[in-house]
Image: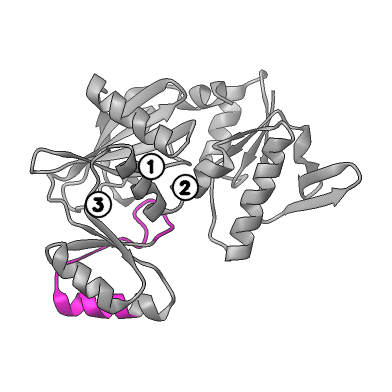
Amino acid sequence: MKIAILGSASSWYVGDLRRAAGDVHSIVPVTYRHLTAQVDDAGVGLRSDATELRQFDALLVRSMPPGSLEQVIFRMNALANLADAGVSVVNSPRAIEIAVDKYLTTTKLQAAGLLVPRTVACQTWEQAMESFATLGGDVVVKPLFGGEGRGITRVDDEAIAQRVFKTLEQIGAVIYLQEFIPHEGCDLRVMVIGERLLGMRRRHPHDWRTNISRGATAEPLEVSDELAELARSAAAAVETTIAGVDFLPGKDGRLYAIEVNAVPGWRALARALDVDVAKLVLSVL
């Protein structure tokens, strides 16, 4: 197969995918910045620099960089046109659109029957302050778009909450806040790759955030039948083929679905489980 990787050419995952592909597949990195669409008598084409993307068998989406509203919509529409042309786009443009939006993801998870933290998305600081009180005066404020723990803040002081919410309103952000779930400093990541499930437990003894990028450590996790069912339900709700589904075991004994990442990393997972995750990813393209 000839496979395009939409992301950074110098990234670790391009190197890992090339290693896993060996002589079986051809791996070519392409970038969002240079995506160019053309519409003519031959139909709709899409290229990155001089590379025509319709020539590929598959395109693996490995990033979703920030951009203007116009840029984001164009990128998604261009990928949808590529899929319509017969190229296997993984994850699908629709899955990327859902997963990149924390509000939309949370509503999809709740509708699928998974337990999620109480959540409010609003646009004024006054509404946010009312929600801050309703959610118990201890909340996690998250950017609507973003990952790896970037921009996430825990707020449990009323005066600080007001300042944070006023600032977010001033910059035109949607104010997205969830009740803080007391936990034991660990969460569960289940990576869904088609029908295959891989699990790890992430621990961080010095931070309530358990992202590997923030210094958490990873250890193997046996995925129980119950956890497998929840992970598959979450991935299906977001319409993903490949997903990193995060669950938080609360001190109240309940398991909360926190996030579905449609472009999950796997370096820590591969090391913890001693599994060739890149090879599994290639198998579902």
Q: What kind of residue is marked 3?
A: Arg
Image marks 1 and 2: residues in contact by CB distance under 8 Å: yes
User: Looking at the image, is 258 positioned above or below residue 74?
Assistant: above
Residue 268 appears in the figure: no
Q: Which numbered marker is on residue 260?
A: 1
Give the farthest residue toward the right.
41
Residue at the image point whose x is 8% and y is 43% from the top: 252
- Nearest to N terminus: mark 2 or mark 3: 2
* Residue at the image position 27 percent from the left and 38 percent from the top: 114
Q: Which residue is mark 2?
A: 98
Residue 223's tag is none
Instruction: Please say whether residue 155 is one of the residues in the magenta stretch.
Output: yes
For marks 1 and 2 on the same chain, the one whose residue lies earlier in the sequence? 2
Tell me which label, 1 or 3, sits earlier in the chain.
Answer: 3
Q: Are marks 2 and 3 in contact (CB under 8 Å)?
A: no
How many numbered marks appear? Answer: 3
Tell me the kind of residue under disc 1.
Val
x, y percent for residue 230 = 29, 30
User: Residue at horizontal 37%, vertical 77%?
Assistant: 169
Q: Alpha carbon of mark 1 to alpha carbon of mark 3: how far?
A: 16 Å
Circle 3 — which element? loop
Per the rendered image, the range of residues in magenta is: 144-166
**Are discs 1 and 3 less than 8 Å apart at CB?**
no
Q: Quadrant of the N terminus?
A: top right
Residue 241 lies left or right of residue 254; in this view the side is right
The residue indicated by pointer 3 is 209
Q: Does 266 sit above or below residue 122? A: above
